[in-house]
């Protein structure tokens, strides 16, 4: 994911500008109609990932008495974050006022309020070669899907009011600082430490994964889990949702170049092959161990591959994409099918197993497959592969520690204001009726 009003990511225009005299570099940026058209499309694709993509993907995996509750949560989060993003979210994540490369102060961890309400943004302002309004809306769709991903960890048991309050708090206290530290540009804490995250391995997936793990631990397992069977009620919805996620992910990864250029093209290619490789390895592993390949396993593998390639999508080559996807498919299969049983946490829809673990795998392997000898874009001058892996581990560690601790604190605070969990009677009846007085199916 490109950084905020800063350099457009290694576009041809930026490369040429670096080679001309300083006076030429000072020339004002000009709007590119091609780049703008692509970014408008990419923004719509990323929004498609949440509604209807993620909503259907999750909705099909829960029991029929809870399908509407998941759809309602995804829709409500989309609306809530859209408003908060304009009011203060974009500014706190991407306002670079006061930031100095290599200098650690408050600005390294959170932006200012100079763009709150979008009042400090002229209508003709550009980020690279696209309108800043388009860039801000593109970033909004990332801010929307990240808390929506967390929903899968506590599906079928959290109160709607508690969800909305926790989402608003988590977005403000966790998502915005992490986004700023990674994508805030020169002077941002993790960016200055050389952490590579092209499209959200740390900001989106590890961030959502650790929050989901903390949430399912603090809220507790579903009634009857793990002894009562709780199969998905409509895998057709889940497959359709996964397909929409796969298509939308091209906007997610290729759109993060903020230009219609060769890097965006490579990001699209590696995204496709990583998803395909992960679907095959998850399917193959399940087939070997259980005797049959499940449809849920195939689509879960594809999503795991999409997650893992996200941080590397702007730096890995095609072979790197296949390798990252293949590793993620196997590792996430065991995380989803074995890890949660071993440790006894009810991550209902495998948010940590797929997004948390997949994000960690992808973030670390980004440091490997950026190497030019493996088809990547190349390591920074003077940086070894081992050193880059260390930088990636720093990014992973910061998100796990900060995101985990703050998620726990915010859930505790939310629980003091409104109960986190529905009552046993409401859970047995189903959240559709208990919370929304509606049914997904009136048969």
Image: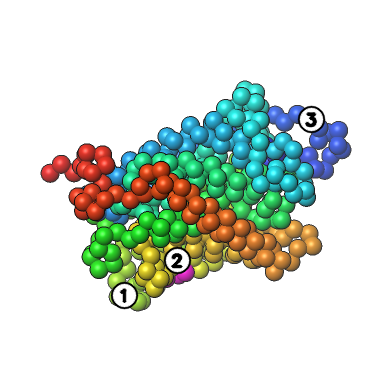
Residue 165: x and y, percent? Answer: 43, 41
Counting other residues with Cα less than 10 Å from the Cα at mark 2, is it few (<14), some (14-19), or many (20 or more)? many
Specify whether residue 13 is in view.
no
Counting other residues with Cα less than 10 Å from the Cα at mark 3, is it few (<14), some (14-19), or many (20 or more)? few
Please tell me which residue is depicted at 72% across the width and 31% down the height of the picture.
29
> Mark 2 — residue?
332
> Mark 1 — residue?
290
The secondary structure type at the circle numbered 3 is loop
Please tell me which residue is depicted at 64% across the width and 43% down the height of the picture.
110
Specify whether residue 239 is in view.
yes
Q: As displayed, is residue 223 above or below residue 113?
A: below
* Residue at the far top in the pictured view: 123
What colour scheme was applied to this rendering of the protein?
A: rainbow
* Residue at the far front in the pictured view: 416
**Residue 27: numbered disc:** 3
Read off the magenta span.
Answer: 329-334
The answer to whether 336 appears left or right of 83 in the picture is left
The answer to whether 383 appears left or right of 376 in the picture is right
Task: Please tell me whether residue 385 belongs to the stretch shown in magenta.
Answer: no
Residue 421: x and y, percent? Answer: 33, 50
Closer to us: mark 3 or mark 2? 2
Quarter occupied by residue 123: top right
In which quadrant is the C terminus drawn? Answer: top left
Closer-to-camera residue (84/58): 84
């Amino acid at each position: 994911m490109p950084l905020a009003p800063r350099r457009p990511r290694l576009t041809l225009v930026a490369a040429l500008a670096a080679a001309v005299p300083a006076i030429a570099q000072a020339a004002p940026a000009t709007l590119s109609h091609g780049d703008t058209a692509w970014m408008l499309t990419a923004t719509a694709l990323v929004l498609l990932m949440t509604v209807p993509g993620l909503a259907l993907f999750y909705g099909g995996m829960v029991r029929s008495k809870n399908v509407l509750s998941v759809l309602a949560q995804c829709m409500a989060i989309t609306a809530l974050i859209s408003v908060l993003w304009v009011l203060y979210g974009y500014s706190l994540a991407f306002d670079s006022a006061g930031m100095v490369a290599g200098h650690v102060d408050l600005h390294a961890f959170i932006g200012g309020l100079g763009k709150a309400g979008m009042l400090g943004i002229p209508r003709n302002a550009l980020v690279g070669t696209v309108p800043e309004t388009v860039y801000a809306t593109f970033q909004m769709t990332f801010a929307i899907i990240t808390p929506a991903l967390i929903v899968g960890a506590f599906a079928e048991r959290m109160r709607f009011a508690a969800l909305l309050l926790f989402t608003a708090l988590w977005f403000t206290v966790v998502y915005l600082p992490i986004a700023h530290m990674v994508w805030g540009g020169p002077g941002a804490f993790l960016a200055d430490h050389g952490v590579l995250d092209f499209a959200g391995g740390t900001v989106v997936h590890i961030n959502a994964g650790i929050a989901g793990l903390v949430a399912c631990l603090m809220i507790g397992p579903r009634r009857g889990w793990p002894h009562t069977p709780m199969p998905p009620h409509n895998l057709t919805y889940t497959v359709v949702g996964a397909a929409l996620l796969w298509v939308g992910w091209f906007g997610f990864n290729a759109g993060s170049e903020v230009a219609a250029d060769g890097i965006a093209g490579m990001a699209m290619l590696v995204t496709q092959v990583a998803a395909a490789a992960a679907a095959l390895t998850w399917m193959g592993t399940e087939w070997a161990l259980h005797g049959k390949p499940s449809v849920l396993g195939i689509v879960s593998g594809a999503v795991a591959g999409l997650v893992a390639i996200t941080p590397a999508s702007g730096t890995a080559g095609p072979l790197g994409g296949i390798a990252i996807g293949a590793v993620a498919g196997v590792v996430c299969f065991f995380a989803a099918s074995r890890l949660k049983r071993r440790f006894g946490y009810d991550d209902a829809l495998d948010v940590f197993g797929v997004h948390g673990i997949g994000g960690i795998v992808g973030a670390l392997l980004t440091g490997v497959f950026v190497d030019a000898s493996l088809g990547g874009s190349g390591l920074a001058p003077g940086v070894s592969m081992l050193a880059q892996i260390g930088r990636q581990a720093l990014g992973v560690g910061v998100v796990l520690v900060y995101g985990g601790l703050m998620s726990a604190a915010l859930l505790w605070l939310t629980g003091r204001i409104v109960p986190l969990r529905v009552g046993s009677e409401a859970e047995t009846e189903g959240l559709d009726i208990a919370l929304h007085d509606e049914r997904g199916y009136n048969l």
